[in-house]
């Protein structure tokens, strides 16, 4: 199984945000289960769909996710609901 970790900090590379430390805990747990994990930072890349697992790691600004995660979420395809 594959996972794509999407870090949604507003900080561009190579700066290391606190969000990356939290995301590292999730990545370690997934890898222990045999999941191959790739990672991108929204602030550095254009993100396209295709992973079986998406993990969004975002700082919370006054209890709300960052604008970077909002951009990533709004660009993800939404599957059609089942018929019948």
Image (cartoon, rainbow, N blue to C red):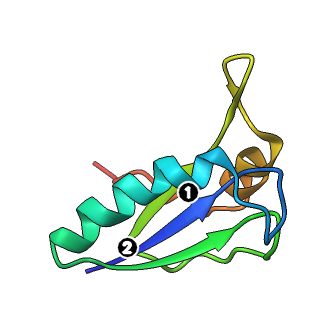
Residue 1's disc number: none
Residue 46: x, y in percent?
Answer: 79, 76
Measured as percent of width and height from the top left, residue 8 is found at 69, 53
Q: Residue at x 70, y 59 (%)?
A: 16
With respect to residue 83, does 47 lie above or below? below
Q: Is residue 60 above or below residue 81?
A: above
Quadrant in the rendering for residue 42: bottom right
Residue for point 67% across, 77% down: 48
From what the image shows, is residue 41 above or below residue 81?
A: below
Q: Secondary structure at mark 2?
A: loop
Name the residue at 36% across, 55% down.
26
Q: In the picture provided, is 28 more to the left or to the right than 76?
A: left
Q: Residue 52 got which mark? A: 2
- Say left or right for 13 vs 39: right
**In-image side of 15 versus 34 (left or right):** right
Residue 80: horizontal and vertical position, in percent? 48, 57
- Indicate the quadrant containing the N terminus: top left, top right, bottom left or bottom right: bottom left
Q: In this rendering, would 22 be left or right of 43?
A: left
- The residue under the point 59% across, 63% down is 6
Q: In the picture shown, does residue 67 fall above or below 79?
A: above
The count of marks equals: 2
Q: Which residue is mark 1?
A: 78
Name the element at disc 1.
Answer: loop
């Amino acid at each position: 199984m594959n996972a794509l970790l999407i870090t949604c900090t507003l900080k561009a590379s190579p700066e290391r945000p606190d969000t990356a430390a939290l995301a590292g805990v999730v990545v370690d747990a997934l890898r222990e289960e045999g999941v191959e994990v790739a990672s991108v930072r929204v602030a550095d890349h254009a993100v396209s769909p295709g992973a079986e697992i998406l993990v969004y790691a975002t700082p919370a600004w006054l209890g709300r996710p960052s604008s970077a995660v909002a951009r990533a979420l709004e660009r993800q395809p939404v599957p059609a609901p089942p018929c019948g």
